[in-house]
Image (spheres, rainbow, N blue to C red):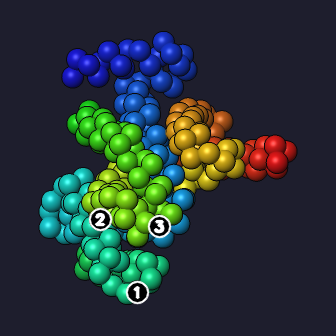
Amino acid sequence: MSELTVLYELIPRLLPFECLQARFMQQALLGLVLLAPMAAAMGVQVVNFRMAFFADAISHSAFAGIAVGLIAGLNPGWTMPVFGLFVGLGIIGVQRKSSLSSDTVIGVFFSGLVAFGLAVVSRDRHLARNLQQFLYGDILTIGPTEIRWLALLFVAIMIFQWVGYNRMLYIGVSPVLAGAHRVRVAGYQYLYAALLALVVTFSVRAVGVLLVTAMLIVPAATARNLTRTAGAMFWWALLVGATSAVAGLIISAQEWAGTATGATIILIACGWFMVSLVVGRVCR
């Protein structure tokens, strides 16, 4: 707890806004500073590999995992990532062993997950109220335990990106060619799917099921407009994701705004994207 206390005391000094004096706002900011760069980094591969539909399917698996947890009397904070993890690995497994296109496989999983979640919720009408915070997100309720888990996931993802970023680009160009050059295609695909599933389920807490895909795609798409190199795209995506998260949290807390934090974060990121379109056109 002491290491978090030091960070909490540092936040008002670096960002002297009145809204950041409250402890729950400091926890929300710290959580977003960890989560947004992770989502942006994983979003680079989502955009390059055209996996937006995959991320959408994972986000809706989180919805089904929440419903199962509430029905079974378990903590949705645990059932959601576990369910999403199995779904992500399952999609990759079926893709690799089936002759169907990836969009078809993801579409089948997506449909089944949504139907399963609705079927579970329909058994108990009172669950709809408990599901609202997951549909729209509420980063202001994050606690120290979740921040520690986010920190561990942040380290794991940055190590993965450092070791496998170029290999993942190679796999995106041609899995067969990558395999011929001794890249462990299956291992990287399964590991990426697992990490992406965890990022998506944590992002549900911040922006909700409806906006998770945007948190992955918009920073990466903005970065692609601003640069043409793979390395620069990674760093631009991190910058856009982090600044959108911090600005969105601060703006949503202002009395003149009073908007939902998750929606405000995505709106800031979309503003970044519109600017990048203009900048990209001028530079070209």
Q: Residue at x 40, y 31 (%)?
A: 30
Q: Nearer the viewer, residue 154 or 80?
A: 154
Distance from the alpha carbon under mark 1 to that under mark 2: 17 Å
x and y percentages locating residue 211 in the rendered image: 51, 58
Q: Which residue is mark 3?
A: 174
Q: Residue at x 22, y 60 (%)?
A: 82
Q: Residue at x 81, y 43 (%)?
A: 283
Q: Secondary structure at mark 2?
A: helix
Q: Nearer the viewer, residue 46 or 164?
A: 164
x and y percentages locating residue 135 in the rendered image: 42, 61
Q: Which mark is residue 224?
A: none
Q: Which residue is mark 1?
A: 100
Q: Nearer the viewer, mark 1 or mark 2?
A: 2
Q: Nearer the viewer, mark 3 or mark 1?
A: 3
Q: Is residue 40 above or below residue 13?
A: below
Distance from the alpha carbon under mark 3 to that under mark 1: 17 Å
Q: Is residue 67 above or below residue 106?
A: above
Tell me: 188 left or right of 55: left
Q: Which residue is mark 2?
A: 186
**Three-letter amino acid code at disc 1?**
Leu
Q: Secondary structure at mark 1?
A: loop
